[in-house]
Amino acid sequence: MRARDPLLGILRIAGRAVTDPASVVRATTHVVTDPGSVLRAAEAAVGRAGSQLLPLVGRHVDVTPLVEQVVDLDGLVATVDVDAIIQRLDLASLVQEVIAEIDLPGIIRESTGSVASSTVQGVRMQSITGDEAIARAVDRLRRRKARTAVPEPVLDDTP
Amino acid sequence: MTEPQISFVPLEARPFQGQTAGIVTRSIAAAIDATLVGACVVGTYVGFNVFLFLINPRDFSWEGSPVLLSFAVAFSYAVLYLTACWSITGRSYGCHVMGLRVVGRRGGRMHFLAAFVRAVFCTFVPIGLLWSGASRTNKSLQDIFLGTRVVYDWTSRRRTVRPLPVSLSAGPSSRRDEAGAGGPDEAGMSL
């Protein structure tokens, strides 16, 4: 209320000075004996005004590009002690969560189980190549038959 | 909670995943399974003789096995083994080694009864596998009659397998592309 209506505050102080002159003397004495209190009061007032003002500014002004222009973010980030941040993190629980999420045991089982051995992979690929070769050979054989005048019967493998 | 999007299938093999396997791969898988069953039969025979020795070591003599009985045991083992493997995981050990999986009509795991019928069919008519070499859809006689498929599946988990969008020059042959029209390859396959 004081910050919003300074005139009312001044009038209140003037009224108090008229009704209680001793308070003016006490205040003056306080300022003389403790000059730092004025500074502290001023800081508190500026802080209160800033805390109310900044959200208003942020609501109307896009601060991000402004900060990007003014502040050297790379330089700022370079000064950050990343190791200290990492030490504060609970990496063990983080890793456990990641392992649980990606099902690492399943991945290991998969990678070491069915297609692990390179020898087995080689045999499988060779056999697939053999399958393809036989399929091509049979196809060629059928085309030769088709070139003869006899129409090739359509093979229907479905039961 | 999302599934990890990491694929452990090598890049060159990804286009084949979910495609119907050819005769070479399937023959090797069948040979591995046959070897396994044969080893089990031999093990049973040896175990039986060891049992006889332990019961009566003095008068022990190595018991021969009639050929008919040996074949009966072998066929029984093969049917039991293949039924259990196909109905539980969709793959026998041979299929596991060769990265294959047997799927039912709808692309999912086979029903126990269907697995049993297929096992009997495969055991007693093994030559039906040869038709997969001549078939456009790489289907054996058993697959044609029962509506099953044997697909490349290098993953160990049962899940939906779709051919990944990796363009390689050595992709699956046109035979399968022709066969895949409207088939499970197109719609993805629930493994």
Image: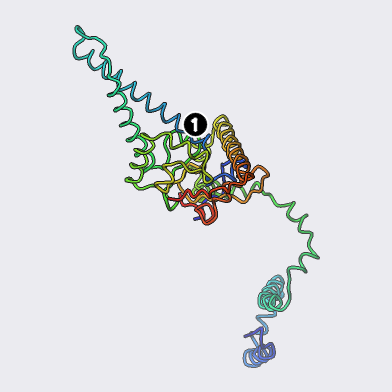
Indicate the position of residue A32 as horizontal and vertical percent values.
Answer: 72, 75
Residue B64 drawn above or below residue B158: above
The total of numbered circles placed on residues is: 1
Residue bearing mark 1:
B28
Q: Residue at x 33, y 24 (%)?
A: B41
Q: Residue at x 51, y 43 (%)?
A: B135
Would you say residue A29 is visible in this rendering? no
Would you say B161 lies left or right of B122 here? Answer: right
For mark 1, name the chain: B
- Compare residues B64 and A12 and report the one nearer the observer: B64
Q: Quadrant of residue A56?
A: bottom right
Indicate the position of residue B126 as horizontal and vertical percent values.
Answer: 41, 34
Indicate the position of residue B128 as horizontal and vertical percent values.
Answer: 43, 37
Within 10 Å of disc 1 (Cα), the crowding (few <14, some 14-19, many 20+) is some
- Compare residues B189 and A99 and report the one nearer the observer: B189
The amino acid type of the residue labelled 1 equals Ile
Would you say residue B94 is visible in this rendering? yes
